[in-house]
Amino acid sequence: MSRPGLRALIAGAGLSGSLLAVYLARRGYDVEVFEGRADPRAVAGGDDRSINLGMSARGIRALRRVELWDALAPRLVPMRGRMIHRPDGTLVFQAYGSRPDEILHSIRRNELNAFLVDRAEKHAGVRFHFGRRCVSLDRDTAALTVADVLTGERRTHRGDFVVGADGAFSTVRRRMHHGLPVDFQQTFIDWGYKELTIPPHADGSARTPIEALHLWPSDNGLVVGHPNIDNSITCTLLLPLAAERGTPSFATLPDSAAATAYARATFPDLPGLIPDFAAQYDAHPVAHLVTVRTGAWHHRDRVVLVGDACHAVTPFYGQGMNSAFEDCLVLDECLSRHPDDRAAAFALFQALRRPHTDVLADLSMRNFVELRDRVRSPLHLARARADLLLNRMFPRLWRPLYAMVSHSTVPYGDALRRARRQDAVLAVTATAALTGAAWATAGFARRRSFRGNR
Amino acid sequence: MSRPGLRALIAGAGLSGSLLAVYLARRGYDVEVFEGRADPRAVAGGDDRSINLGMSARGIRALRRVELWDALAPRLVPMRGRMIHRPDGTLVFQAYGSRPDEILHSIRRNELNAFLVDRAEKHAGVRFHFGRRCVSLDRDTAALTVADVLTGERRTHRGDFVVGADGAFSTVRRRMHHGLPVDFQQTFIDWGYKELTIPPHADGSARTPIEALHLWPSDNGLVVGHPNIDNSITCTLLLPLAAERGTPSFATLPDSAAATAYARATFPDLPGLIPDFAAQYDAHPVAHLVTVRTGAWHHRDRVVLVGDACHAVTPFYGQGMNSAFEDCLVLDECLSRHPDDRAAAFALFQALRRPHTDVLADLSMRNFVELRDRVRSPLHLARARADLLLNRMFPRLWRPLYAMVSHSTVPYGDALRRARRQDAVLAVTATAALTGAAWATAGFARRRSFRGNR
């Protein structure tokens, strides 16, 4: 209770907004959270276009810090690796890592959101206001104007500061930057996605192994499936949006007739796993994927952004929610380091986080290409196995990039630098081996490690 | 009068909006133009932060096409080259090109704007509404809502289509893209600028040679000066915005006391040319420079963007206005090619223009670095002279990039490709000369020209 009496207004009761409410409440702040959508506890399945979440080390650490992990853990499904559905119908399993804790945990976005809102609301100082959409902001006075989504009635609330946790198309961000010289970039990928669910059997049992992330790779589309606690699997069909050179796309597959034929040819076992494939395909919308980079994450001591509002990434590294949770933890640490200077805390938050979330944006795009094209290639599998082998032999010296991003809390940028050093060592070693010049290895390796330590 | 009765609403009566009004009026359209600012004919000097304009071949062609050039030409000051003010106080003149028509023409933004509004208004179908700010747009019905800047009163106008000519921070663009998956990027440079004017002597004569673009280069700031028809010179002082490593910046020069000392040390002859340097420095604001890239330039047949609204560039190639004028000409040609399908005309406009304006954005940033750091270097001067010499020797085969951008109407992207081929030939020739391997020249040159023609 270092700063009792301070009042925070949070725009957005999604994942980052509701977790941050817990963090701020534990600092003794009064917290009001405004959200245009309905209370997630009152909504059954969400909006049919939320890619499921893979909780990994960063998200778990942020939940542990505020003592939420133990209560949440039983609601998650462990994913121990990738289950590749090959075009010939066979399954291939790739473990995520060599350690028992190198697994991901799957949960529906809406379920996690409901859990967080519920826990946040148990704090005396936290109040949620659903159906209240943020429409404007006075960035200098931390005055947030919200509109009742039913009546349109507007009310302006005043706080000591405002948190923009209102997602990739953040209103707080737009109002905070209005008229200021702030860099901004939003980039959509030219693929979209559609949600399809593999239901459990009538007796409740699973139609396909549950404890894995399911992947149906192909050159003409990609399906990713996350398991749910009820033995269903939420699948995401990814396809190019526009028709080009005769390849399948959402444009060439406008309805389930065309889509069913395409799915049978491309992912042979999938239609059989989804009895109502056609009905789901026709009912669910096509959603888009965006990367957002933002120049200014805060305005003085009055406004700060977290999560997608300052760094939306594509979901292909499974780190969107994990990095948003990490934001909450880091922002809280910054507030601890500058208890009497919130502007300095916000500036430190951006300085500590942005280099790493920029790297995450790049890695997420890289992984999109890898998932789309290379997961099924023998070379990629060999490389992944080599990484695992090296990791088992030299567990402290060698960690694959994927493991550092997903199973550690090493900052993203540091993880990338370390992986590049490892790649260089591999390349030099392989070159030396191929040329038979074993003496070169030692020399190069020494030089490389010297560089790495600068 | 191919489509009589069509009604265009133009948001913005700046340079592109007022010229486009002329183009559309000549097609027989009714045109209503809405502009939040006052009528430029009623404003003396503009807003003290408009970098002067260097009219070059592209702008001239677009004005000629609608028979405006001859009336405008006498109001412009020819700039025959760059006049470099060296730190030791001496002047060095670099001609722009080897041909008599390779010159630029300087005019104040406000004067050009007033001229265009005046000419546009002579067309029966054109009406300007000043003090009317565009606040909203229904992109599907081409309904534009404008507010009276004094009373706040709003009115919605309906047209067949809306043109967003409302600048880098276009409201039309924002409303047109709202909720759509459209890429967007705005990037500010970390330098700002301040306008300073060298007045003529009391007898009306010029204080420094008039028929040139004036440059005061340095490692710690840059001044660019454009001549005016009244023998004054509008200067733009460019400096880093933030203090860094002890170098001068607008942050370290907050007022005229510090700025005068800095200017005396860095641009020794400048303070003497501006008797009221201190007063001007304190009175004029610091402005920012932005590059904007936009994914979608039109919405069906209802909305289209021109000029800064779709491709704002930094002013360092002097092509912002020229490329905006070229937009008007190209859009008009597209409307001619698709007289009965405006959506196709708009799509063609974007397809034809965007690759080239993207290149212009890159070139403008490259030129910023060159102007800042390299103009005074002997190597750069030697390179510029070599380009001019080659151009004189092989006028049809060899044209420097600068000449193609500024003195021709070759599309920007094509100009860059041709310059790269020329650079490659230079590099190969120089290498051959240096190695004495004259036989290599012919072989490489053949190969290069083959590649170039693919």
Image (tube, coloured by chain):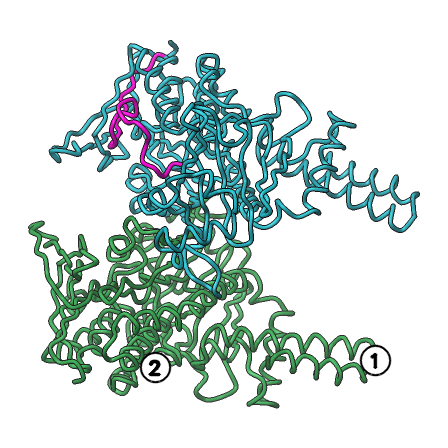
Chain colours: A cyan, B green
- Residue B155 sits in which quadrant? bottom left
Give the extent of the magenta segment.
A28-50
Residue A57 x/y as whole percent: 55, 24
Instruction: Note whether residue A409 is visible.
Output: no
User: In this figure, which residue is indicated by the disc labeled 1?
Assistant: B436
Front one among B150 and A452: A452
Quarter of the picture containing the C terminus of chain A is top right
Residue B424 vs B316, above or below: the answer is below
The residue depicted at 83 percent of the width and 80 percent of the height is B436
Separation of residues labelled 1 and 2 (CA atoms): 46 Å
* Residue at x 54%, y 29% (from the top left corner): A209
Chain letter of mark 1 equals: B
Q: Is residue B25 magenta?
A: no
- Say left or right for A281 vs B452: left
The subunit letter for the residue under badge 2 reads B
Q: What residue type is labelled 2?
A: Ile
- Secondary structure at badge 2 equals helix
Q: Position of residue B24 (x, y in %)?
A: 20, 77
Q: Quadrant of residue A451?
A: top right
Image quadrant occupied by the N terminus of chain A = top left
Determine the main secondary structure of the stretch shown in magenta. loop
Tag 1 near tag 2, CB within 8 Å: no
Residue B64 in the figure: left or right of residue B43: right
